[in-house]
Amino acid sequence: MAVKPRAVKVCDVTIGDEALAVMAGPCAVESREQIFAAAAVVSAHGARFLRGGAYKTRTAPNTFQGLGRKGLELLREAAEAHGLLTVTEILAIEEIDASLPFIDLVQLGSRNMHNVPLLRALGRRRVPVLLKRGFGCTIDEWLHAAEYILQEGNPDVVLCERGIRTFEHATRFTLDVAAVAIAKARIGLPVIVDPSHAAGQREWVECLTLAGVASGADGLLIETHPDPDRALSDGPQAVPLSRFGDLMDAARRVAEAVGRSIPCGAPASTLLHGTVAT
Ligand code: PEP
Ligand code: MN
């Protein structure tokens, strides 16, 4: 039997409403110029959250690991300047307290989905959590991970389907669109889709975005970068900022076809330090 769906409120944004919550920005915060450029464009096209990793879980240790605290500060500053909320990952319990002032929605990454002490620690905080599905995990395992957070007393969990590992190598991961409906029906929490990590190449991000919206996702998490060829992480899957508006227009058409909406953003020029100029 399907569980009654529940929306999760993050500041003034409700995830699980008729309107999809769009979260977008670079894989990692790299510089002030980069994150401010991303914030300006994504807010102008309807995103409500600015994403950008400060602490990264990279597969290889000799790659860019994020700017750490400086990255969190830049993310918050850029988001505030453009009226956005922040979503970013933390990797360890020791990072939680110092990081929370900079984060509105705490991302728990695919590689950390089974980190029970971290799940429990986030469950004890009153902070909304975005729980990504482990790429080698079943839907059941993912929902049990969410229960660790819920059972500690934190009801504000949003799930994120970001693709699972299969024998198929044409994409980086295989986006499991059925998981969106199944997870929602079983646990009643909002589910968003990350087409970027599933696609692995920007060429396939649009079709997975549209499939995610059609599957009933309550939001999208999308990587976009001012200059993807120079990105320090996940460049191949980043949509150039110059293409982000077209991607949102396409997503909006599908959202409307399935009885949902994606807000139109305020033109960048009308946004002044987080408030819409009147
Ligand atoms: C990310 O969002 O940049 C990320 C590392 O995602 P995932 O945990 O899904 O791999
Ligand atoms: Mn990434």
Image (cartoon, rainbow, N blue to C red):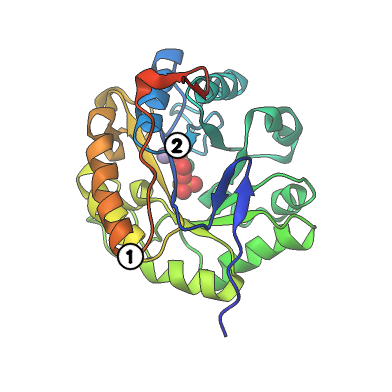
Name the residue nearer the viewer: 5 or 267: 267
The quadrant the N terminus occupies is bottom right
Count of number-bearing discs: 2
Quadrant of res 144: bottom right
Left or right: residue 47 versus residue 54 is: left
Residue 277 horizontal/vertical position (percent): 46, 19
Residue located beneath label 2 in the image: 60
Residue 201 visible in the shown view: no
Earlier residue among tags 2 and 1: 2
- Write the residue at 52% across / 39% down: 57
- Write the residue at 40% across / 65% down: 216
Q: Residues within 10 Å of mark 2 (few under 14, many from 20)?
A: few
Q: Residues within 10 Å of mark 1 (few under 14, many from 20)?
A: few
Residue 27 visible in the shown view: yes
Quadrant of res 71: top right
- Write the residue at 26% across / 36% down: 245
Residue 122 versus residue 274 in the image, above or below: below
Residue 192 versus residue 44 in the image, above or below: below
User: Ligand 1: does it lie within 8 Å of the C-beta at label 1?
Assistant: no
Left or right: residue 182 versus residue 208 is: right
Residue located beneath label 1 in the image: 258
- Write the residue at 27% across / 58% down: 254
> Which amino acid lies under the numbered mark 1 shown in the image of this protein?
Val
> Which amino acid lies under the numbered mark 2 shown in the image of this protein?
Ala
